[in-house]
Image (spheres, helix red, strand yellow):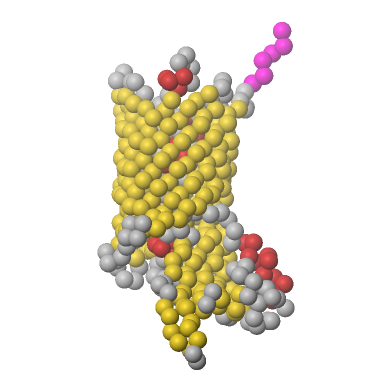
Amino acid sequence: MFCRKIPIISFLFVVGLSGQSIFNAYGLGLSKSFQHTSSAGASSIGLVPTFHPGVSLDNPATWSGLKFTYISGSYSNREMGIDANNSSNTGGGIEKIQFVIPIRDKYGFGLSIKPVNDHYSYFKTDSISFDFQGKTIQSNKVFRSGGGLMAGTVGLSLPLNEKMAFGLSLDRLFGSSRDEQSLILNDMHYRLFNIRTYSGSTINFNFAGQFFSNNKIMILGFAKVSMTGSPVSGTLYQFDVFEDRNQNFSYDQDDYPATAEVDTINISNIYAPNSFSLGFNVSFKNNMNIFTEFQLWNDEATNANYASIIKEQIGSKTHLGAGMVRFGNLDARSWQDRITLRLGSYKETYGLRYSGKTINENGISLGFGFKFAATGNQLDISYRKGSRSMEGGHKEIIKDFTIGLSLGDVWFLRRRAKQ
């Protein structure tokens, strides 16, 4: 009877694809630091201006600085490689889709949808052979996970005074994931998997302010405080082991046994992120900007019984990044002068909750942006290369290519009086 529900549940966790990493198998996986292409090109977590002078599409407090309404989308293709054996895998997916409206040079309103974490992982054991009643059996195990959390966001920008602005955004967290363990005997898969659905919310407070300005430089400061509104909860579906005879990675009537038992368990308080971020940007007269950012992130969830493939969870993260951005000029006659150049580097440390071990990630990035058309359309491209490792574990090489397109339009302008 339950098998009728399989196609519906299977659809829930197909939210995109990403490069598969062993480290993504810890709990809900690694949280994403870079969303929009313009931020990724500078290794920015989205606080400081990277899209337009004074504006980050990831920071609602800066949206009033936009001259046009934008519909923006970013797509990423990622390659994950294991340094020890030169193996690699690739995957791609939507990073962010966003709609932002500046209103009367004072306010801003935006909507977006984006993935929150990386939960895609895949690894397998070496094959072993053994004799069973005169027959040679080849055996190995495969572990994989996919899906993850998504966020639908509503954001608002408000002025505090002439030099300071406030941004408020609400993230509605949703999505689903699947983790699977398979025993392979002579190419026949015996699968044991779990499916989880998620629901929760977070609230974010953003601040942007001008600290100093003269005819040569301008110093800007940015801050963000994120808190859990409703800890993520959901439903866990635990399937019995079955023989996947048609190799379609899910249970159906062609598999053995003809019916499979499944336990349905309500899970609560499995993810409750809180963070504090701080950034500074120095803007020079020639459109050159240098910046630095810092973030402390913690998961305050209290459900210790939650676990994915690896019986461990990500409990904390620190981020330190710096870079430079030279903005292009939309009104320039030469196309070369319309190009925005971005460079950045970062260091992140993830803390594991139970073992106390850390995952260390370092990387550099390069990005370009090109403005075209009268309404400030912008094509952004970024490339990031980094490494991720843990003491006593393996080392991964990350290569990430992201492309984004932002289309501008004119909204909320007064109509000219008829002559």
Q: Quadrant of residue 52?
A: top left
Q: Residue at x 58, y 36 (%)?
A: 71
Outermost residue toward the left in this view? 391
Quadrant showing the C terminus: top right
Q: Does the rendering let one see residue 12?
A: yes
- Is residue 311 part of the magenta span, yes or no? no
Q: Is any part of residue 350 visible from this angle?
A: no
Whole-percent x, y for residue 170 in the image: 53, 50
Q: What stretch is highlighted in magenta?
A: 414-419
| Quadrant in the rendering for residue 103 | top right
**Placement of 103 over or under 96, stated as above or below:** above
Q: Which of 347 and 22 is in front in this view?
A: 22
Q: For the stretch drawn in magenta, what is the main secondary structure? A: loop
**Residue at image x 51%, y 31%?**
379
| Direction from residue 174 to residue 351 in the image, left or right | left
Q: Which of 45 and 140 is in front in this view?
A: 140
Which quadrant of the view contains residue 322?
Answer: top left
Horizontally, is 137 left or right of 319 in the view? right
